[in-house]
Image (tube, helix red, strand yellow):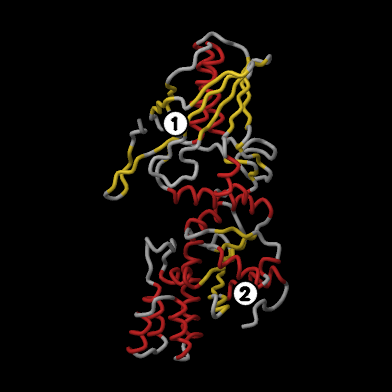
Amino acid sequence: MAFEHYIRSGQKLLRCGYTTGTCAALAASGAVRLLLSGKAPSHVSLRTAKGIVVDVPLAGSGVTGNTAWCSVVKDAGDDADVTNGMEIVASVRRTDKPTITIDGGDGVGRVTKPGLDQPVGMAAINRVPREMIACAVQEICEQLGYDGGIAVTISVPDGETVAQQTFNPKIGIVGGISILGTSGIVEPMSEKAIVDTIAVEQHQARLRSADVIFTPGNYGQSFLQRSGLDSLGVPIVTVSNFVGESLDIAASEQFQRVLLVGHIGKLVKLAGGIMNTHSKWADCRVELFCAYAALCGAPQELCRRIMDAVTTDACLAILEEAGLRKPVMQYISDAVQHHLERRAAGAYAIGAVLFSNEYGLLGCTEPAKEIIQQWNGNTSFFEE
């Protein structure tokens, strides 16, 4: 039976799931009971930090030598989670020391870079899941009158393969997925998971530098390479559509200088104060081009053509034909800079570089030029 707990999102009810940390704790609970009593339970349950009880059947169990194991299948509910349906396995054995130790086995990643929840060299089983596992194991030990030690190993079949679809390889977790969760429950808000990852990447970048470059995605990464900005030794963090949240995180991390480099199709929205550039939140790209073209004296017929354009490159082509591309882009760049500074609120220096794949560099705000000069030592970096 599916986990039946829901949250409301607009007019829809979305079914929640439970985290890999909850699965690991549930599996460890069943494995310890099997180890100490010789009998595996049909169901395992625990109360999460949210106060919600998760009760699920075991997917498998067994005893090999002095080790017992149980597994639980991850249920992500309506969340778009690549770990949904994966089997989380906990193996346990008695130890001489009266402590509970927790480690990762096959399919659980290992930390190779500083700045993450666990130290370098440790299994990527975060602090809260470790506490959940330890509490679940301790509870069964107390129920069955066992006061010795237990060694717990969490493994995930196919974890190494699935991890390639996550941010783990990028943030320095190798060999598998992470065992995660702070509340024990997965609420179907995949945006939060992305923002959390951006926060981790920024924290890692801050350990190395007081400066950072933000870019929305692959186009930005390619432009950074073509322009040579990626060779300045400044960490680069991919922020996806979450520009506003990323700027807020940068303030909390106390960066000194932030350079935002992005395709005009994304960053033109910032000229209207739109800080989440996903199309489901807002578009307004042609409207913004039209408004600034009108400020530059564009006639009504030209404005109509811009409003009928399908892409930002089409807008730029119309403006280029009319001799208005540079003045319009100056207006847009200035507006982008204004809204970036408003969001940063003086916490750090901020500048923006805008480009398109067809036209190349479109705008580099004055603060961006100053930041690049401080990094590069030249009076100008781009040849405009």
Q: Residue at x 52, y 24 (%)?
A: 70
Looking at the rendered structure, the kind of residue marked 1 is Ala
Q: Position of residue 58 (x, y in %)?
A: 46, 25
- The disc at residue 7 is none
Q: Amino acid at mark 2?
A: Lys
The answer to whether residue 40 is above or below residue 367 is above
Q: Position of residue 161 (x, y in %)?
A: 59, 44
Q: Is residue 283 visible?
A: yes
Q: Relative to residue 57, is residue 372 depicted above or below?
A: below
User: Which corner quadrant holds the C terminus?
Assistant: bottom right
For the residue carrying disc 2, how many other residues have a C-alpha within 10 Å: few (<14), some (14-19), or many (20+)?
Answer: many
Label 1 residue SS: loop
Q: Which mark is residue 49?
A: 1
Q: Residue at x 33, y 89 (%)?
A: 301
Which image quarter holds the N terminus? top left
Residue at the image point whose x is 43% and y is 61% from the top = 276
The residue closer to the viewer here, 337 or 174, is: 174
Q: Please report whichever mark, 2 or 1, sits nearer to the chain's N-terminal start.
A: 1
**Is residue 291 in view?**
no
Residues 161 and 198: in front is 161
Residue drawn at 60 percent across, 37 percent down: 107
Residue furthest top as drawn: 145
Measured Cα–Cα span from mark 2 to mark 1:
48 Å
Say what secondary structure mark 2 lies in.
helix
Q: Position of residue 315 (x, y in %)?
A: 43, 81
Q: Is residue 369 above or below residue 21?
A: below
Say which residue label 2 marks.
369
Q: Nearer the viewer, mark 2 or mark 1?
A: 1
Looking at the image, residue 177 sits to the left or right of residue 270; the answer is right
Q: Quadrant of residue 52?
A: top left
Q: Position of residue 53 (x, y in %)?
A: 39, 27
